[in-house]
Amino acid sequence: SAYDAGDHESYMRKEILEQPTTAQAVLRGRLDDRFGTAHLGGLDMDARDLRAVRRVKILGCGSAYYVGQMGAALIEELARIPADAEAASEFRYRDPVIEPDTLYVAVSQSGETIDTLLAVQEVRRKGGRCVGLVNVVGSAIARECDGGIYLHAGPEVAVASTKALTNMFLAFALLALQLGRVRDLSIADGKRLVAGLERLPAQIEEVLAIEDDLVEVAHSLAEAQSLFFIGRVRGFPVAREGAQKFKEISYRHAEAYQTSELKHGPLALIDPGVPTVALVPHDELTERNIGALHEIAARSGPLVVVTHEEVDLGGIDARRVVVPRNEPELDPILLTIPLQLLAYHAAQHLGHDIDKPRNLAKSVTVE
Ligand code: AGP
């Protein structure tokens, strides 16, 4: 059946490798290259409703929260609407102000995460509009929302989420595009992003093709008791997701940090036994990122740098992991894929049960 891991050693690896196909599924029928926009019928919002949105608040737990941060950046960049993500598990406990012109977005693979469901209910009880980015059709969160975007990633079995997260990112890109195109996002930019999204599934395939090069890197990371994942702006939620995935299945302590904040504290921990996985895309922050790598290298901290071909690390002693470039706004998802493989091969090396890590459930349905 479709639920069978088949020849794969685990569902997680199967689900990682499915991503070029599942990424196509979330985009199918939703891209408009003529007008450089997206069509999202399930949102149930017309151009007027979309234009009335003054702020976007994204709610999710764990990795869905981190992808929510990637989504907030996309929305703020493309639509120029203030957007942020918050852990759904904290939301209702601070008695949040619900604004009528804020669009609330609940993000969940399972659609059954109790903390996210209760956050949606809090929004709706106070009269707010909440849409869902949900994978499981007809799930509790999907039913509770005013409308939404189904992720079409297919069934995800491994506790560590991969393909559903990729589709969450793509759904956010579609939403950002649509919110942008009823505002100031130009048709040229809209078309540029539609073309970028159309290229992504093949580029995900390219990243998966470097798996063999990542195995040994993953094994060396697995030897460390503690490691850092660092990134800036678009790269920071990628670092958070990378650390999360690594922790969940390797049981190593992995901490995500903004690269810019290293010097304000955690640099004290860097030594030859504490590796850092750094996200260094080719963008306006490359030079500053490389400056931070020098600080780490000067303390003999082992470095793995996930980066683009164009980026020259100079004399820094680092393992380079090169991913293809897309449009800068869409790059975060291509930077995320190798981190899935690093976590997977570290856990495999340590002999852990990859699909069912200790202490964790696929969906957390009790508070
Ligand atoms: C992801 O690898 C985790 N297992 C976890 O953080 C998960 O993303 C979170 O519990 C949210 O689940 P959901 O998407 O089903 O709501």
Image: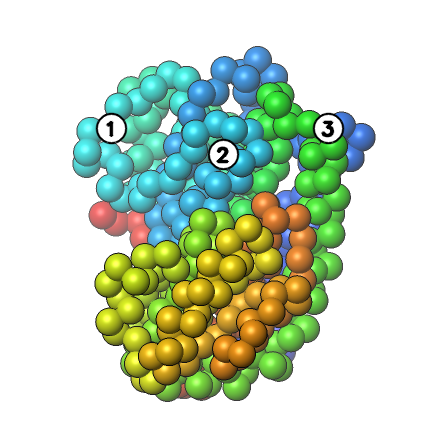
Query: Compared with residue 345, is residue 334 higher up or lower down, i.e. above or below?
Result: above
Residue at (80% x, 30% y) in the render = 34
Graded by Cα atoms within 10 Å as few (under 14), some (14 to 19) or many (20 or more), the crowding at tag 3 reads: some
- Residue 184 place in picture, x, y as percent: 61, 23
**Mark in the foreground, 1 or 3:** 3
Q: From the viewer's perspective, is the residue at label 2 or at label 1 nearer? A: 2
* Real-space CA distance between mark 2 and mark 1, rounded to the nearest whole angstrom: 21 Å
- Name the residue that disc number 2 marks: 76
Q: Mark 1 points at which residue?
A: 96
Q: In which quarter of the image is residue 335?
A: bottom right
Q: Position of residue 207 (x, y in %)?
A: 64, 67
Q: What residue does disc 3 label?
A: 187
Which amino acid does the dot numbered 2 rest on? Glu
| Earlier-in-chain disc, 2 versus 3 | 2
Callout 3: SS: helix
Residue furthest to the right:
34
Inspect this view and state whether residue 241 appears: no
Q: Position of residue 199 (x, y in %)?
A: 73, 52
